[in-house]
Image: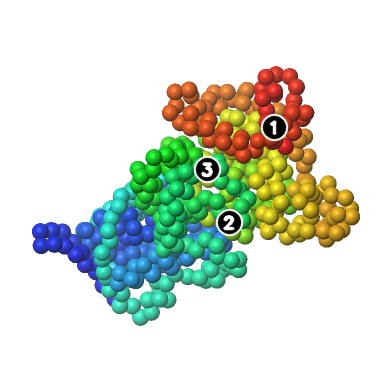
Amino acid sequence: MLPEAVWRLKCSDRDSVVMSHRTIHLFRKGLRLHDNPTLLGALASSAALFPVYVLDHMFLEGAMRLGPLRWRFILQSLEDLDARLRALGSRLYVLRGSTAAVLRDLVTRWSVTQISYDTEVEPYYARMEQEIQALAQERGLQTYTHVSHTLYDLKRRCSTPAEPDPEQTYGVPSLADLGLENESEVLWPGGETHALQRLHKHFQSQGWVANFSKARTVPNSLLPSTTGLSPYLSLGCLSVRTFYHRLSSVYAQSKNHSLPPVSLQGQVLWREFFYTVASATPNFTKMQGNPICLQIDWYHDPEALEKWRTAQTGFPWIDAIMTQLRQEGWIHHLARHAVACFLTRGDLWISWEEGMKVFEEILLDADYSMNAGNWMWLSASAFFHKYTRIFCPVRFGRRTDPQGQYLRKYLPVLKNFPSQYIYEPWKAPEDVQLSAGCIIGKDYPHPMVCHIEASQRNLGLMRQVRIEQQNTAELTRDVADDPMEVGLKRELHEEEELLEGAEQHSKSKRFSGDADHKSQKLYC
């Protein structure tokens, strides 16, 4: 039996809209109704439109390494999208299986004549689009696709399908249905509704929006000191275009406001930058075969990688960050800097690809372009060339949270340590450790490396790599006439202000010799 999902356009007498197609609108990202030009365009040409999401478990797991936190966020976003569609008299049809196989079946069952979907840049979505185009050619279907970057006003209505049990057939599954478990608190509810609520809340304080500076936010505050919109932008629950124009409106009313690249609008431009580079760079998520990435002989050390991943490095600042990541699926961008530097060029000399995979599995805002791009940046494999800037896993966190409240929250085993020892508990006398109820080496691990020795060794390795691969290093080096150069220097300067005082401690630990050695900063 065919579901009669007819959307009725509200047109004036002078409007003339030809509605002839029976269309499947395939949601992938773009899980929203606001600013969805593909959906709007498909509606304009359709007598019947079926909103569909294919939960292609093998595709999603294979292409994106989704962990339970990310799965939960996706399912919540689907539930929210379904609720918003039902409020308009429609619903979301969620089906499980291979995308190509599901579409092939629905085309026949629903007498479909058109498939619409958002344009995406990731390689795995490009492969999916090839399968859709092949199906369309085989069945004589039309396709409609659009980059999701224009505003619209959706006023549509459709009836529910005449199915024996539509909820069982098309309902959003639970985590348990997918064989997954996650009992952690939901701090980032998925969906367009929560995205728009969060957006509205932040824009109530136009002064905060106008003066936002990325480098002056606090990485270890107990509540996010940034907008927290990144998970919603990543999955398309919030339109980046809507966000950008709301920012432009605030800036237009402000005599003075922060500027790119440290402003909120600058963060959107960085997002566009990584999307642009990723779309034009083969093997962007890999070192081998990636023309802009330095080819580095990273250590293969599964044991060290596992300690980093499971928050067992023995450095409380690093372990607290990784614990927050695992529990909540989100960490501040400077916290990401700290753990990425520690894993790669700072301490462990392990490939950025390994860190990227962990972030891809756990981060709610994991994104093909930005995840890989930022890992290359932070490991100094591409884009970032101040490789002598190494974040100390002790002083970096202590600078903005000297009492260690962040550590006490995410590492309760250390919560009774005095503030003077909580970032370096291995330095606490035995009686202090006994009083705190935590013996280092028993209840909490010793540091897995000596930071000063490891960072000095890695600086030498990185220096040699860059000498040998100078041509590759130059591919993404800043140039003097680059309009972003001034802004980038300002951003780096502000991050240095955040860490002021750290350089003095490291002076006695610096290499002696050439000028490059003299300029290194260990931030210890």
Q: Is residue 378 above or below residue 471?
A: below
Q: CA distance from mark 2 to mark 3?
A: 15 Å
Q: Quadrant of residue 469?
A: top right
Looking at the image, can residue 135 be seen?
Answer: no
Q: Position of residue 218 (x, y in %)?
A: 59, 47
What is the crowding at mark 3: few (fewer than 14 residues within 10 Å), some, or many (at least 20)?
Answer: many
Q: Which amino acid, mark 3?
A: Lys
Residue 385 located left or right of residue 462: left
Residue 313 located left or right of residue 58: right
In the drawing, what numbered circle is on residue 1? none
Q: Nearer the viewer, residue 14 or 373?
A: 14
Residue at the location (49% across, 57% down)? 60
Q: Nearer the viewer, residue 204 or 285?
A: 204
Q: Which amino acid, mark 1?
A: Glu
Q: Position of residue 161 (x, y in %)?
A: 31, 74
Residue 107 located left or right of residue 466: left
What is the crowding at mark 2: few (fewer than 14 residues within 10 Å), some, or many (at least 20)?
Answer: few
Q: Nearer the viewer, residue 520 or 115?
A: 520
Mark 3–mark 1 contact, CB under 8 Å? no
In the drawing, what numbered circle is on residue 223? 2
Q: CA distance from mark 3 to mark 1?
A: 22 Å
Q: Secondary structure at mark 3?
A: helix
Residue on which the image places disc 1: 503
Residue on which the image places disc 3: 214
Identify the mark nearer the N-term, 3 or 1.
3
Q: Secondary structure at mark 1?
A: helix
What is the crowding at mark 1: few (fewer than 14 residues within 10 Å), some, or many (at least 20)?
Answer: some
Q: Position of residue 288 (x, y in %)?
A: 56, 36
